[in-house]
Amino acid sequence: MKVGLIGLGAMGAPMARHLHARGLLCAVGNRTQSKADALAAELGVRAARSASNFADCDIVVLCVSLDADVLENVTALADVLKTGALVVDHSTIAIDTAKRAAAKLGTHNIGFLDAPVSGGAEGARNGTLSVMVGGDEALLERARPLLETYAARITHMGATGAGQAAKAVNQVLVAGINEAVCEGLALGEALGLDAERLLPTLMAGAAGNWFLDKRGATMLRSEFAPGFKCAHMLKDLRIVEAIVRTAGVRASTVAQARADYAELVERGLGEADTSALIELKRPL
């Protein structure tokens, strides 16, 4: 199996390293060419300069930021990939965008899986991501060997778009947890509680969760090195809001989180980790 990967950010670069470790990776691409050149030199694979550099790939993995990026790459790949090739998209995009991408590739007899991930940069580095997959189950079985290089759980959610639907649910929960943890820890700070005693006590009880465990101590030290950026969370929440409206579900948590992350971006914290949300919760 020859695999190419486009998008070498905090998630894509470690995914590429996992694929390379299993002998699957043959080419990498990125909008910033220097990133692709550097990683390609490190791993001894091809640095793509255009879609044509992926023409011999059996599967191309996308891990990019925006719906427009996905459609741009899909359009370019549709003209160069061989019949029967497969595109696996790990980006978080709208359900309709996933369906448009699948349709575009389908006219060239190229498969498509919408396969957003959860687990953050740590999950990508450690190979413990959770992958939510929409599309044909037979295509998923073809892609499973490469997904297993960086995922601890791979779940077929249904037809095309179902992966993105599951990711929307995931982001509702993530947004709510972030809001609660940041508000709670800001309160603990204001009350003068000792973080070294408070955090393990909270983790041992019903309040324990991934965000508190991975980000609690660093956010209390006002350290916001990104695992998942505020700007990316805002982008995801805008997608989720559109899905929520269509579904007719009341989701006040999503609205509050979207407003909060928009404010953080306006404050110049778009590149900071999502735990920078505590800055809004602290006393003025």
Image (cartoon, rainbow, N blue to C red):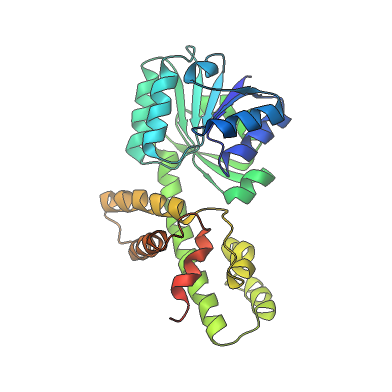
Looking at the image, residue 246 sits to the left or right of residue 142; the answer is left
Q: Position of residue 118 (x, y in %)?
A: 54, 48
Q: Is residue 17 above or below residue 82?
A: below
Q: How many numbered circles does the render carry?
A: 0
The residue depicted at 26 percent of the width and 49 percent of the height is 246
**Residue extending furthest toward the top:** 83
Q: Position of residue 210 (x, y in %)?
A: 60, 61
**Residue extending furthest toward the front:** 34
- The image quadrant where one finds the N terminus is top right
The residue depicted at 55 percent of the width and 22 percent of the height is 48
Q: Quadrant of residue 281?
A: bottom left
Q: Position of residue 61 (x, y in %)?
A: 53, 29
Out of 134 and 198, give the one closest to the viewer.
198
Q: Position of residue 240 (x, y in %)?
A: 36, 51
Q: Is residue 152 above or below residue 227?
A: above
The residue depicted at 65 percent of the width and 32 percent of the height is 39
The residue depicted at 44 percent of the width and 43 percent of the height is 92
Q: Can residue 119 be seen in the rendering of this structure? A: no
